[in-house]
Structures are given as structure tokens and as C-alpha cells.
Image (cartoon, rainbow, N blue to C red):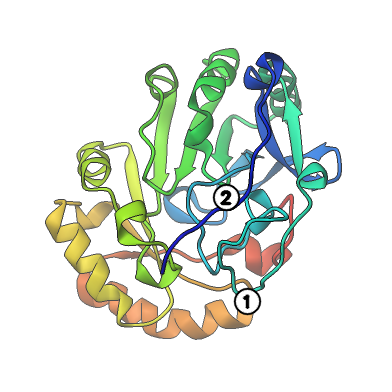
Amino acid sequence: MDCVHSVNTPALSPARLAMLTLAATTPGEPEIFASLQGEGASQGQPCTFIRLSRCNLACVWCDTAYTWRFDGDNRPHRDDLSFERGANQVAMSEEDAAAQILALGQTRLVITGGEPLLQGAALAKLAALLAPNVRIEIETNGTVAPHPALDAHVAQYNVSPKLAHSGNPEALALLPERLAQWAADPRAWFKFVIAEPSDIDEVLALTERYLVPRSRVYLMPEGRDAATIARRSRWLAALCLQHGFAYADRLHIHLYGDTRGT
């Protein structure tokens, strides 16, 4: 499936380039919130989340399409919804973002998206403002190299390479150089979204090709409602046992549903 983006993004002013571009919970309100981590190696841990806008991939089942599928974007999504950019993006200085994060009182920060590493330089400034009081995790699709100044502040990467069922072309979603570097980084935990039992074949091929330790791999059922997750978890748990992978639930869906700011 071709991935085509027909949006003409307006040029950004120098001031805008120095700021973070966040997703919004409601128009004008940045998506910065305290919650429990719902997925992966830190599941259940109290933390603050900051959700950035924009993504270089387009998963057909993405549950945060409001971060990238703006009006005029013709990349496919199963909901076939588009979002007005002005109501779903917030520009914010690193200083203001750091102040809101610290005000929530958590010692763990999860930076998510969209694809947050697209804003590496601004995130490096944010991380420096938070150091050394906040432990930083970054959720990434694994296609973008971390900015060196940001990388020095990151305690954990939650890397989620996109399999074929995501609808992304392999040439865009599975970059050999990047996957090899993530596999070699002990801070990187891998989370694969699984929709069908046959998806395990792709996971096995990738982990073997890039020498990803199975002890750092989680398999998570694709689903945006508790019933779908529960149904898929029954056969996915058996696959985890068979192949030595950890199972990752979607705790936030069970607790709060598919909602922003949770």
C-alpha cells in the first residue's frame, strides 16, 4: 500500500521552530496529563504523559490519528476521519511544557505521539529543563534516530516497529539501520502490535534478523476497546508462552476507554 501525503504544510516562523508541537485534548489545551502507563515494560507505573503531534507513518488502526490525519491528508485510516489542524495542535515553549510537567508531581515522564523523535531538538531542550528530577521514557515507531542531546537524557525507549498489517510500506516502517541500532541499545524495549496469530511470523523474523533479545520483546493485542483486547489476549497469551515473549495489555483502555488525556 502506497503512503501518500498530499498536505501542503505552511512554512513555520523561526519562533514556531523553537517550540514543541503538541496534540490537544480539547482546542487550545495541550495533552499533558498524569496517569498510569498502560503498555509495555513500565505498565502500571504512575507517570506524566506529553503527547506530541505529527507522525511520519500512518497506521490504519492508529488510536491517535488526531495527531497526524489532518484535513487534506489522504493517508488511509479505517475510520476515514480527518481532523482540523488548528483544533488539534498546540504550539508550546519548552519552558511552559516543563512547568506543566513538573506541576503534576510525577517523577516519570512518557513522551509519546505521533512520532515524538521528529521533534528531537526541542525535546532535548525540554529534557534539560527536567533533569535530573524526571526519568524520561520515549515511545517511538523506531524509524527516527534520537537527537544526540536528547538521547543523553533518556532512560528508556519503548520501540514499536510497525508490522505489515499497519498498512505502512516496509521501506518506510522497518529501516534496517535503525532496527539494528535499537536492538543493540539495552534501553530499548520492543512492543509489537498483534492483530492476527499469523503476525507472530513477522515478529520472529525481525527479532532473529536484528538479534533482538526476546527478554526485551512485548506482544500487545491491537484493539481500541476492552472486548477486542480480551478476545485477542486469549490466543496471544498462548503465543507469548510458546515463543518466550512477554505479554503487554492496554491497561488504559480497560480503565478509561479510548479517550484523550488518559
Residue drawn at x 57%, y 50% is 37
Rate crowding at label 1 as few (under 14), some (14 to 19) or many (20 or more) other CA atoms within 10 Å.
some
Residue kind at label 2, given as amino acid type: Gln
Residue drawn at x 75%, y 56% is 83
Q: Which of marks 1 and 2 is nearer the N terminus?
A: 2
Towards the viewer: 10 or 191 = 10
Looking at the picture, does residue 124 appear above or below residue 1?
Answer: above
Residue 33 shown left or right of residue 129 in the figure: right
Looking at the picture, does residue 89 appear above or below residue 39?
Answer: above
Q: What element carries label 1?
A: helix
Residue drawn at x 32%, y 36% is 187
Towards the viewer: 120 or 185 = 120
- Residue corresponding to mark 1: 226
Towards the viewer: 54 or 136 = 54
Looking at the picture, does residue 57 appear above or below residue 24?
Answer: below
Find residue 253 and report its horizontal and vertical position in percent: 64, 66
Residue 111 shown left or right of residue 256 in the figure: left
Find residue 123 and report its horizontal and vertical position in percent: 55, 24
Give the numbered dot on residue 37: 2
Residue kind at label 1, given as amino acid type: Ala
Res 93 → quadrant: top right
